[in-house]
Image: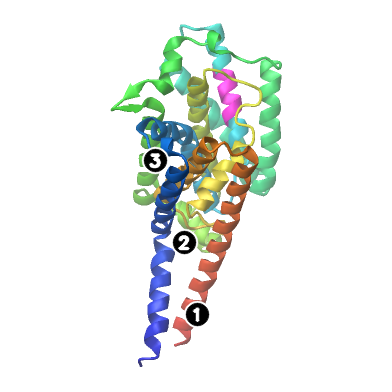
């Protein structure tokens, strides 16, 4: 009997970290903070951490939407193009009608985003097109519409009213509005995924699509729903992006979709579906923000920022695959006994 204790202890420890991967991520973030602080003393300041939170707020919002989609075994490569198109459209509306109430602009952005997300959902559910192909196509279409709608022109800070500029950078509860909005989105996502049946159906669909269908879950409707949610969040993020940077450009958020995938996967969302948490995604976004900020303070080239981001994605995917294999092996042995 004593010979079984080390293996049992090892499996228990492995299962613990598999279930609470956020703890390992928190430990890595703390270690990274110490290392960067030793290299760049200016890193550990309130203003710098506020900048980090501002920089990752939009990333965190869209990464949460991306995470929901990945949990269903899908992906949305059009998130950055959706953001850019909404940012451009609402900015041109404000340029033409500067007296438009900010709340109407926010609702307009959310509405536009929901339409663009619905297009993705319809192509995938009705058209039966694989998500990666469908959203790769709409990525190009929406980016092309940015150029078509703007005719290649940019909206500059002078074209936007001051009230809209304060939407993201104004202060509420001691934090920039953009950070507060990101927190609200995270809280809503947490409640939705953990305490509402439609959110639980997302996990069921990703864990086993066939079993979910047999159990009565309308898998097509759930799939459509997550892409609409993604569009809504991207629409809100597009409005906040235009307010934060006080501009709308044809290259807005170019390549940003890869960062959202990275934040979700690094945060523990399984590419195999069915696994992922809101705190994990937020930690993934925070990790990317700290790395980018630290490398910038150290005057290290952008190449290394992208290289580190790519390395972390590979590490997260490999770790997830290893965990899934170990869990499957442990369950198989348990059944065998």
User: Does 284 sit left or right of 173 as displayed?
Assistant: right
Mark 1 crowd level (few <14, some 14–19, many ≥20, 10 Å Cα) = few
Q: Tell me the number on the disc at residue 332.
A: 1
The magenta segment: 83-90
User: Which one is closest to the eye, mark 1 or mark 2?
Assistant: 1
The answer to whether residue 223 is magenta is no
Position in image of residue 210 (x %, y %) = 55, 62
Q: Around disc 2, counting alpha carbons within 10 Å, would you say few (fewer than 14), some (14 to 19), or many (20 or more)?
A: few
Name the residue at 62% across, 38% down: 302
For residue 186, the mark is 3
Q: Earlier in the sequence, mark 1 or mark 3?
A: 3
The quadrant of the image that shows the N terminus is bottom left
In the rendering, at what x and y percent does residue 26 appear?
A: 40, 53
Q: Secondary structure at mark 1?
A: helix
Secondary structure beneath dot 3 equals helix
Dominant SS type (magenta): helix
- Asked if the residues shown at circle 1 and circle 3 are in contact, with their CB atoms under 8 angstroms apart, the answer is no
Instruction: Identify the residue shown where x is 31% and y is 25%.
Output: 172
Nearest-to-viewer mark from 3 and 2 = 3
Task: Report the front residue among 311 and 74.
Answer: 311
Residue at (55% x, 68% y) in the render: 322
Marks 1 and 2, Cα distance to the nearest angstrom? 24 Å
The CA distance from mark 1 to mark 3 is: 36 Å
Q: Which residue matches tag 2?
A: 215
Mark 3 is surrounded, within 10 Å at the Cα level, by few (under 14), some (14 to 19) or many (20 or more) other residues, namely many
Q: CA distance from mark 3 to mark 2?
A: 29 Å
Q: Which residue sits furthest left?
A: 173
Label 2's element? Answer: loop
């Amino acid at each position: 009997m004593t010979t079984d204790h080390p293996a049992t202890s090892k499996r228990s420890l492995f299962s613990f970290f598999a279930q609470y991967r956020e703890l390992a991520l928190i430990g890595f973030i703390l270690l990274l903070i110490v290392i960067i602080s030793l290299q760049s003393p200016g890193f550990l300041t309130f203003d710098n951490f506020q900048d980090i939170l501002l920089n990752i707020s939009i990333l965190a919002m869209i990464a949460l939407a991306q995470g929901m989609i990945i949990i269903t075994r899908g992906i949305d490569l059009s998130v950055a193009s959706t953001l850019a198109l909404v940012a451009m459209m609402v900015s041109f509306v404000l340029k033409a009608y500067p007296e438009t109430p900010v709340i109407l602009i926010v609702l307009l952005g959310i509405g536009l985003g929901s339409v663009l997300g619905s297009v993705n959902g319809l192509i995938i559910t009705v058209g039966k097109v694989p998500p990666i192909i469908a959203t790769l196509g709409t990525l190009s279409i929406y980016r092309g519409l940015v150029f078509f709608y703007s005719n290649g022109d940019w909206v500059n800070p002078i074209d936007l009213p001051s009230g809209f500029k304060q939407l993201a950078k104004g202060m509420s509860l001691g934090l920039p509005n953009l950070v507060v909005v990101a927190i609200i989105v995270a809280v809503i996502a947490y409640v939705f995924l953990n305490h509402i049946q439609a959110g639980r159906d997302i996990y069921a669909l990703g864990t086993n699509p066939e079993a979910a269908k047999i159990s009565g879950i309308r898998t097509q409707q759930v799939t459509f729903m997550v892409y609409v949610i993604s569009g809504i969040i991207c629409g809100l993020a597009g409005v906040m992006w235009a307010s934060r940077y006080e501009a709308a450009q044809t290259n807005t958020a170019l390549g940003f979709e890869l960062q959202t995938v990275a934040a979700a996967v690094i945060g523990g969302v399984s590419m195999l579906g069915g696994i992922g948490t809101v705190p994990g995604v937020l930690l993934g976004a925070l990790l990317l923000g700290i790395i980018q900020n630290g490398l910038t303070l150290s005057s290290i080239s952008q190449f290394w920022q992208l290289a580190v981001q790519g390395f972390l994605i590979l590490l997260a995917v490999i770790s997830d695959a290893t965990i899934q294999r170990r869990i499957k092996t442990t369950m198989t042995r348990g059944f065998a006994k």
